[in-house]
Image (cartoon, grey):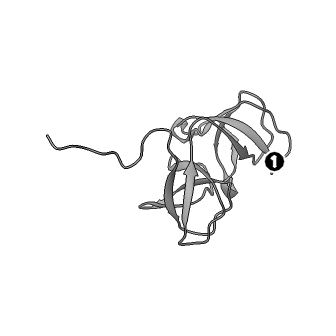
């Protein structure tokens, strides 16, 4: 059997190509092979939060797992299950939403859209 070296190890941030301009701290999702954009709606293809601003075509670090501070699209209560939303934000899950889209669980509340809350990431 040949040796195998993983591309990335668990807990390690990964890098992707920005498919459009990305603002650091925004939730990003795959848009093509090894390419991410800010989320525009709920999706199972979310990858994590961009670690810095990136121009289209530039490399961008993406962090996931653990607890992240993410921007909310609507009021969030502690314990809310969150899914991706427009502009790289998260929002509480709505009835009928696919649970494969879950980003995580809010560990802090936030009543103001556009501000951050802490989220225990689902992956």
Tell me the residue at 42%/42% (across/down).
9
Left or right: 55 in relation to 47: right
Q: Residue at x 13, y 40 (%)?
A: 1
Residue drawn where x is 82% and y is 38% of the image: 110
Residue designated by label 1? 115
Instruction: Tell me residue 113's x, y (percent).
Output: 82, 48
Judging from the image, what secondary structure is the residue with disc 1 in?
Answer: loop
Residue at 52 percent across and 48 percent down: it is 13
Measured as percent of width and height from the top left, residue 53 is found at 66, 63
- Taking 6 as reference, is 15 above or below it? below
Quarter occupied by residue 34: bottom left
Horizontal placement of 18 versus 88: left or right?
Answer: left
Q: Quadrant of residue 81?
A: top right
Considering depth in this image, is 115 or 62 the residue closer to the camera? 62
Q: Nearer the viewer, residue 41 or 34?
A: 34
Across and down, in percent, residue 109 comes to 80, 33
């Amino acid at each position: 059997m040949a040796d195998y070296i993983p591309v990335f190890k668990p807990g390690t941030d990964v890098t992707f190509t920005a498919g459009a301009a990305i603002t650091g701290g925004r939730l990003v999702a795959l848009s093509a092979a090894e390419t991410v954009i800010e989320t525009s709606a709920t999706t199972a293809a979310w990858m994590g939060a961009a670690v810095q601003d990136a121009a289209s075509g530039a490399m961008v670090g993406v962090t996931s797992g653990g607890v992240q501070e993410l921007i909310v699209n609507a009021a969030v209560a502690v314990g809310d299950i969150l899914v991706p939303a427009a502009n790289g934000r998260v929002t509480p899950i709505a009835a009928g939403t696919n649970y494969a889209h879950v980003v995580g669980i809010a560990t802090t509340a936030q009543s103001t859209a556009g501000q951050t809350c802490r989220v225990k990431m689902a992956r």
